């Protein structure tokens, strides 16, 4: 659950400083700031210490394998949304990527598909709704889950039911899934230890604007459209 909260920093540092400025729909900023402060405290006293320990004991090649595994495990979400967005060619390519990495990449631990020119894509139902013309709605910060918009909340709900992490595939479903989620969260947080210091100024504004701009970049596939949603994409 905490992964969205910590992933916002990765999104923030990935945003280009040349992105065009767009209006931000943030009518409940005081509430959002309070929730973000709560999330930060959870991170400070729980997640960050665990991430530091993980980073200290796990060699880089092992961390890369963990990251590849979880990216591949959740890739059916990407595939489904490629087709829903009408990107049929990309959908078949991502299906091929998933199959190659699942089989020859040892359940996705190794990203074999990239050597065949099949790059990793990021697609979710929040982006799909944006492509369909659904407005983003107000920006919100969710407890533990981090930044989103009203459209994004709907997107997360839909993706949850497609994500294999939430399926009945596991024998000991609850215990195994909880352990895997914990590892995924800690691994993701560990990847941010070296980049979080790049956040500057008003941290709330920096993270909010960077997050929204990054989401808009994803929904437009890197092409900025001045006629797009004036309140940016939240998810």
Image (tube, rainbow, N blue to C red):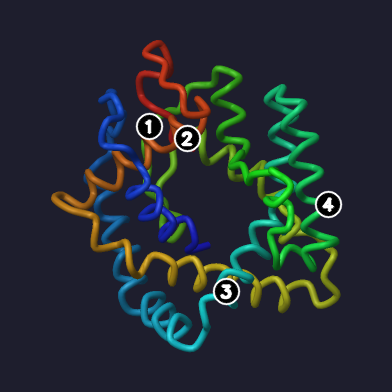
| Cα separation between marks 4 and 1 | 38 Å
| Cα separation between marks 3 and 4 | 25 Å
Question: Is the C-beta separation of discs 3 and 2 under 8 Å?
Answer: no
Q: Which dot, 1 or 3, sits closer to the camera?
A: 3
- Residue denoted by label 3: 182
User: Most extreme residue toward the bottom, as rendered?
Assistant: 57
- Residue denoted by label 1: 138
Give me the residue at 48% from left, 63% from top. 2
Residue 173 in percent (x, y) is at: 78, 72
| Cα separation between marks 2 and 1 | 6 Å
- Residue denoted by label 2: 150
Q: Which dot, 2 or 4, sits closer to the camera?
A: 4
Secondary structure found at label 3? helix
The residue nearer to you, when weighing 149 against 232, is: 232
Give me the residue at 70% from left, 65% from top. 110
Mark 2 or mark 4, earlier in chain: 4
When the figure is inspected, residue 148 is found, relative to residue 175, above or below; the finding is above
Mark 3 or mark 2, earlier in chain: 2
Residue 50 in percent (x, y) is at: 43, 82
Image quarter of residue 40? bottom left
Question: Is the C-beta separation of discs 2 and 1 under 8 Å?
Answer: yes
Q: Which mark is residue 99?
A: 4
Secondary structure found at label 2? helix
Secondary structure found at label 1? loop
Q: Dot 1, how many residues are within 10 Å of its Cα: few (below 14), some (14-19), or many (20+)?
A: many
| Cα separation between marks 2 and 4 | 33 Å
Mark 3 or mark 4, earlier in chain: 4
Residue 229 in percent (x, y) is at: 42, 19
| Cα separation between marks 3 and 2 | 26 Å
The residue nearer to you, when weighing 190 against 173, is: 190
Mark 2 or mark 1, earlier in chain: 1
């Amino acid at each position: 659950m905490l992964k969205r909260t910590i992933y916002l920093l990765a999104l923030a540092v990935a945003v280009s400083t040349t992105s065009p400025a767009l209006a931000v729909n943030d009518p409940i900023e005081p509430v959002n700031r309070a929730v973000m402060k709560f999330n930060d405290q959870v991170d400070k006293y729980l997640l960050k210490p665990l991430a530091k320990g993980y980073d200290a004991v796990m060699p880089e090649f092992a961390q890369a394998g963990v990251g590849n595994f979880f990216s591949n495990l959740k890739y059916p979400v990407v595939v489904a949304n490629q087709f829903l967005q009408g990107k049929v060619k990309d959908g078949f390519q991502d299906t091929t990527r998933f199959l190659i990495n699942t089989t020859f990449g040892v359940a996705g631990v190794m990203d074999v598909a990239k050597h065949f020119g099949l790059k990793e894509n990021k697609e979710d139902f929040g982006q799909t709704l944006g492509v369909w013309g659904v407005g983003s709605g107000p920006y919100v910060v969710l407890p533990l889950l981090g930044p989103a918009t009203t459209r994004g909340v709907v997107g997360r709900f839909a993706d949850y039911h497609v994500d294999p992490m939430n399926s009945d595939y596991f024998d000991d479903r609850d215990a195994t899934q909880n352990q895997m989620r914990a590892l995924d969260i800690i691994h993701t947080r560990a990847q941010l230890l070296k980049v979080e210091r790049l956040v500057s100024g008003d941290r709330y504004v920096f993270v909010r604007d960077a997050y929204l701009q990054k989401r808009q970049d994803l929904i437009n596939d890197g092409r900025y459209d001045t006629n797009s949603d004036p309140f940016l994409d939240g998810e």
